[in-house]
Amino acid sequence: MSNDLSRFLMSRRRFGALAGAFGLAVGFAPTLISRAFAQAKETADKIIHGKSPELIIHNAKLGVTETPLELLRKHKHTPKEILFSRYHYPHEGNAAWYATTAAPPAELVKNWSIRVDGLVKRPRTVTIADLQAMPQEQRVAVLQCAGNGRSFYAAKQKVAGGQWQNGGMGNVVWEGVPLKPFLKGLEMEPSPAARWLTAEGWDQPATRVGTDFAKSYRLDDEALDHAILALKMNGEPIPAIHGGPVRLIIPGFYGNMNVKLLTVLMLAAEQSPSTYQSMAYRMPLVPVEPGTFGANDYTLENSRPTYGQAIKSVIFSPLPSDSPKSGMVEITGVAFNDGMAPITSVEVSADGGKSWHMAKIETPESPWAWHHWSVKTRIGAGEQTLMSRATDALGRTQPINGLARWNPRGYEWNGVERSAVKFA
């Protein structure tokens, strides 16, 4: 780590004592909290208070949960009770305020601060109260884990990690302070030498030698023009389990790039050396095959970060659990991308790709939101393979063979959607 970078990156541990105190204040001993993560495996509501018991559990200790499509399709905006969750470190004694859909404790919010530092004219520390007093804007955007769809790569070779299907996503209304006006308003225009913005959150690595979770973005990336320091999710304070009290939201970017529990914004000449920037959450620059490229072989030179979301579509109905009848059937779903170009078409097949039908796409709430689509077609009895494929104005589309994008960390699955459904 460079001297400049190490000097200004703030450790998440500076909040450790404070957060631990709140864990005890709400009535949980650390041993009981640890037990809640490690042993309560039966339903998600036992792991994260307020979550639906119907969520799929991928990792009880870390509170990693996925939303069944049967729940996801019911809501225009995904409620906190069913929104997927993904953290990287066990929080042990701090879990009482973290492992809940409730808002973070008022005293914690009062004492929370964000340090803006590095290659700026005047470093500043900003509180939540400061942010609340600034103009707010909304962003309706899909939040999606970069590993969403990882289980589908197993058709070539299974990769490690949560075996997500399609439920590691949600359509969320975020509200907060626009990033670029925020920096400008604080007279914090970066110096000419600043090329990167690094965001760091509070959550702590499992050991003292572990790397903090820090992500970096090029300052000239136009996606930052739409970024906000979000204070609300679906009109309410953001729960800590989803990144509150303040989360960096960059619409169209994968979830890991939307740093939770934000404590640091730093302008620098170089990107962060954090493992999560330099090796994890990256995609190989060229196609790789199992056995030729390992999960620890990523470098800044041979890979890229999981920034903007690959174009994708998901079928919401009929699902196999619907036990639909044959005849004229309406097939519905959603499509989305990184918001850099409009989604121009969604093609749907009800016979395994032999024939395709153009779906009707509803006008989305924003470029980064779900694009709902639907089409009616006649479907015969028996098991049929439903398929959907989205395309945008830049010509980006879902590959027929999603396995061509196989990678040893299982990121960015966006193969043509396939769903085997039995019709009566």
Image (tube, helix red, strand yellow):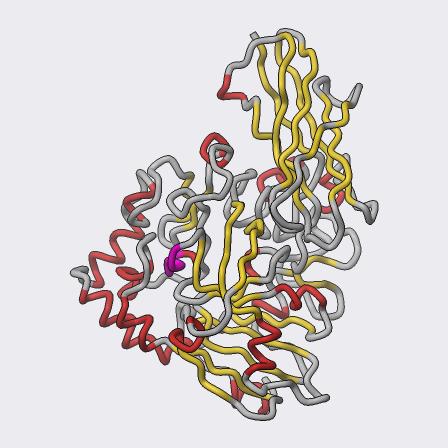
What's the magenta region? Answer: 236-241
Q: Which quarter of the picture shows residue 358?
A: top right
Quadrant in which the C terminus is drawn: top right
Q: Is residue 239 magenta?
A: yes
Q: Quadrant of the N terminus?
A: bottom right
In the displayed structure, would residue 67 be above or below residue 110? above
Q: Looking at the image, which is closer to me, 87 or 157?
A: 87
Q: Nearer the viewer, residue 369 or 282?
A: 369
Question: Would you place residue 53 above or below residue 26 in this image?
Answer: above
Seen at 30% across and 71% down, the residue is 108
Residue at the farthest right position: 395
Residue 174, magenta (yes or no): no
Q: Is residue 176 left or right of residue 157?
A: left
Q: Residue at x 73, y 37 (%)?
A: 390
Q: Position of residue 344 (x, y in %)?
A: 77, 40
Q: Is residue 10 left or right of residue 302?
A: left
Total number of numbered discs in the rendering: 0
Task: Provide residue 309's location: percent of width, then percent of height.
Answer: 66, 52
The image shows residue 250 at horizontal and vertical percentages of: 60, 62
36 displayed left or right of 137? left
Up the image or down, 178 lies above or below 241; here it is below
**Quarter of the rendering containing residue 261:** bottom left
Quarter occupied by residue 184 = bottom right
Question: In percent of the image, x 34 and y 63: which residue is there?
Answer: 91
Q: Is residue 173 above or below residue 305?
A: above
Q: Position of residue 348 (x, y in %)?
A: 72, 26
Judging depth in this view, the residue of 98 and 340 nearest the camera is 340
